[in-house]
């Protein structure tokens, strides 16, 4: 978007960007269509408010999509804020297109908060028929249909979804555990749907109870459910009451922020592929489907220190 639409600057670009030789180089332009405030929440929020109220204050409709890295739990407190955590470009494209339609064509009083990461990784083509699921908050990205001794459901969002996909490979190849992988584009939207369905059922006791979208997706699916994200465990925990499986393991990055490589941070906060596998095996052990020794052996196999410091206490 930076290259194609340009970042607005009243004086244009006055410097040579360090990423000039990359496809996604940083481009400022007097005709730029993106407002960018740098790593500055206060300034960015001011621009966001200006964009969101421009239609009434200046008779100039704009598209208030706020793109940053975090504050999903805070965003959930705003009723008309739609929040998404896409992993792939096609997910972002579907969300942006849907948002433009809702805010302009349908004139809905909503605005959007989207996390977009700066990590470089391969961008696959959009699978067929996933658009509705992307907007509702989750869709089945990978389905393991091969015979396996056990089965689990893995959920991931943002860049951690890639770790979840790798975990599914490890479970299949090294533990004979099949895993369906769900891309969760918005835990907040899933919660919104769950609360709405719960309220509707409460107010219409004589009618057949409706199912939440989470129940529609996971109902009838085999195995426990494991969710891993780059955010606090509360982020994924907020859907627990609608997950059909009793065994619902949530991994998250509770603790103080710190600076290190992505690989080390994901291991430190226990949200990487090995900890996803460990949580899946633990859930199967909780069910009595495998022996606890399998979990212990996995800890040794992955070189995990069982006495490592709790990131929440560090």
Image (spheres, grey):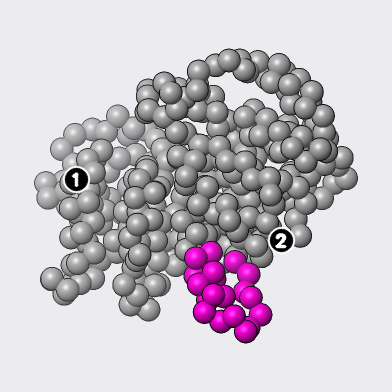
Chain-order first, disc 1 or disc 2:
1
Front-most of residues 166 and 239:
239
* Mark 1 closeness class: few <14, some 14–19, many ≥20 residues within 10 Å: few
Left or right for 276, reference 264:
right
Front-most of residues 106 and 12:
106
Q: Magenta region: which residues?
A: 193-212
Q: Quadrant of the C terminus?
A: top left
The quadrant holding residue 68 is: top left
Residue 205 is inside the magenta segment: yes
Residue 97 percent coordinates (x, y): 43, 65
Task: Kindly tell me whether residue 162 is visible in this rendering.
Answer: no
Location of mark 2 (residue):
219
* Mark 2 closeness class: few <14, some 14–19, many ≥20 residues within 10 Å: few
Picture residue at 34% right of the left edge, 32% below the top? 19
Vertical order, 61 against 128 (above or below): below
Task: Kindly tell me whether residue 281 is visible in this rendering.
Answer: yes
Picture residue at 86% right of the left edge, 42% below the top? 148
Residue 58 is inside the magenta segment: no
Residue 149 percent coordinates (x, y): 87, 40
Vertical order, 16 against 202 (above or below): above
Mark 2: which secondary structure?
A: loop
The quadrant holding residue 132 is: bottom right
The disc label shown at residue 42, or none: 1
Residue 302 percent coordinates (x, y): 68, 19
Mark 1: which secondary structure?
A: helix
């Amino acid at each position: 978007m930076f290259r194609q639409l340009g970042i607005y600057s009243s004086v244009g670009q006055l410097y040579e960007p360090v990423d000039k030789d990359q496809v996604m180089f940083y481009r400022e332009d007097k005709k730029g269509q993106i407002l960018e405030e740098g790593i500055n929440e206060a300034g960015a929020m001011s621009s966001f408010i200006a964009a969101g109220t421009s239609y009434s204050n200046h008779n100039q409709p704009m598209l208030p999509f706020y793109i940053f890295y975090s504050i999903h739990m805070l965003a959930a407190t705003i009723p008309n804020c739609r929040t998404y955590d896409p992993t792939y470009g096609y997910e972002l494209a579907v969300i942006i297109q849907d948002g433009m339609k809702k805010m302009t064509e349908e004139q809905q009083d909503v605005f959007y908060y989207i996390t977009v990461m700066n990590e470089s990784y391969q961008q696959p083509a959009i699978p067929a028929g996933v658009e509705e699921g992307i907007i509702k908050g989750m869709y089945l990205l990978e389905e393991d249909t091969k015979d396996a001794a056990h089965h689990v459901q893995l959920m991931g969002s943002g860049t951690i979804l890639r770790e979840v996909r790798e975990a599914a490979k490890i479970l299949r190849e090294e533990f004979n555990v099949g895993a369906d992988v769900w891309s969760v584009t918005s835990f907040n939207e899933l919660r919104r749907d769950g609360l709405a369905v719960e309220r509707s059922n409460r107010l219409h006791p004589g009618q057949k109870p409706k199912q939440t979208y989470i129940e529609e997706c996971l109902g009838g699916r085999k195995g426990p459910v494991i969710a891993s994200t780059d955010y606090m465990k509360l982020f994924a925990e907020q859907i627990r009451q609608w997950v059909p499986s009793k065994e619902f393991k949530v991994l998250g990055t509770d603790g103080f922020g710190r600076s290190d490589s992505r690989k080390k941070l994901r291991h430190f906060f226990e949200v990487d592929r090995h900890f996803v596998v460990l949580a899946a095996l633990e859930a199967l052990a909780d069910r009595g489907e495998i022996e606890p020794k399998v979990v212990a052996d996995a800890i040794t196999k992955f070189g995990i220190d069982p006495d490592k410091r709790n990131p929440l206490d560090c």
